[in-house]
């Protein structure tokens, strides 16, 4: 049986240093200018007047209510259609937005799952 010489591996100093990620900061959230427009504010006030300041998912009252697009704008939803607006509390709004983002990202990552 032939004997094999053990291969000696040497590490080459690449000159790269470790990146300190503890100083990284999330960029501040910015509001889309559309949500500051007179048209959006008027529509939201109208929807709240019609439906009341109540979360349409969980029924919560006495809290901040968000006007949420049912079919998100990034997915082609109508901007100023009251039928595309749902009034949600902060918790329900966050949950719905995260789910919509996950679905959108899955659709982008796997185009075969998109609607035809």
Image (cartoon, rainbow, N blue to C red):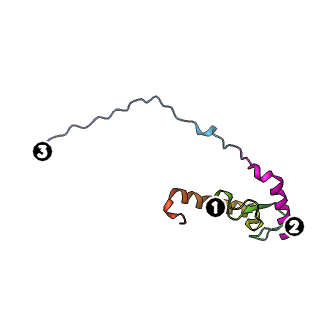
Q: Are marks 2 and 3 in contact (CB under 8 Å)?
A: no
Please tell me which of labels 2 and 3 falls first in the chain. 3
Task: Give the number of the disc on residue 8.
Answer: none
Q: Of discs 2 and 1, which sits in the foreground?
A: 2
Secondary structure of residue under mark 1 = helix
Residue 1 is tagged as 3
- Using a 10 Å C-alpha cutoff, classify the residue at mark 1 as few (fewer than 14 neighbours), some (14 to 19) or many (20 or more): some
Q: In screen coordinates, is 59 left or right of 97?
A: right
The residue pinned by badge 2 equals 49
Q: Residues within 10 Å of mark 2 (few under 14, many from 20)?
A: few
Along the line of sight, which residue is nearer the eye, 35 or 60?
35
Q: Are marks 3 and 1 in contact (CB under 8 Å)?
A: no
Q: Position of residue 53 (x, y in %)?
A: 84, 66
Nearer to us in this view, 114 or 27: 114
Instruction: Report if the CB atoms under discs 2 and 1 are less than 8 Å apart.
Output: no
Q: In the picture, residue 11 is in which quadrant?
A: top left
Q: Nearer the viewer, mark 2 or mark 3?
A: 2
Q: Quadrant of the N terminus?
A: top left
Whole-angstrom CA distance, mark 3 to mark 1, is 63 Å
Q: Which residue is mark 1?
A: 100
Chain part drawn in magenta: 28-51
Q: Is residue 43 magenta?
A: yes
Q: Count the marks.
A: 3
Kindly report the distance in space between the C-alpha atoms of the residues bearing marks 2 and 1: 27 Å
Q: Is residue 102 above or below residue 33?
A: below
**Residue 38 percent location from the top left of the image:** 84, 53
* Mark closer to the chain start, 3 or 1: 3
**Measured Cα–Cα span from mark 2 to mark 3:** 90 Å
Please report the residue visible at 55 percent of the width from the left and 66 percent of the height from the top: 115
């Amino acid at each position: 049986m032939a004997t094999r010489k053990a291969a000696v591996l040497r590490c080459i100093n690449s000159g790269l240093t470790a990146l300190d990620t503890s100083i990284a900061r999330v960029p501040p959230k910015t509001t889309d200018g559309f949500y500051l427009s007179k048209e959006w504010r008027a529509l939201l006030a109208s929807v709240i007047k019609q439906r009341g300041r109540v979360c349409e998912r969980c029924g919560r009252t006495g809290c901040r209510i968000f006007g949420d697009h049912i079919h998100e704008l990034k997915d082609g939803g109508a901007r100023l259609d009251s039928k595309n607006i749902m009034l949600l509390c902060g918790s329900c709004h966050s949950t719905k937005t995260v789910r919509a983002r996950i679905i959108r990202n899955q659709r982008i990552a796997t185009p075969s799952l998109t609607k035809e």
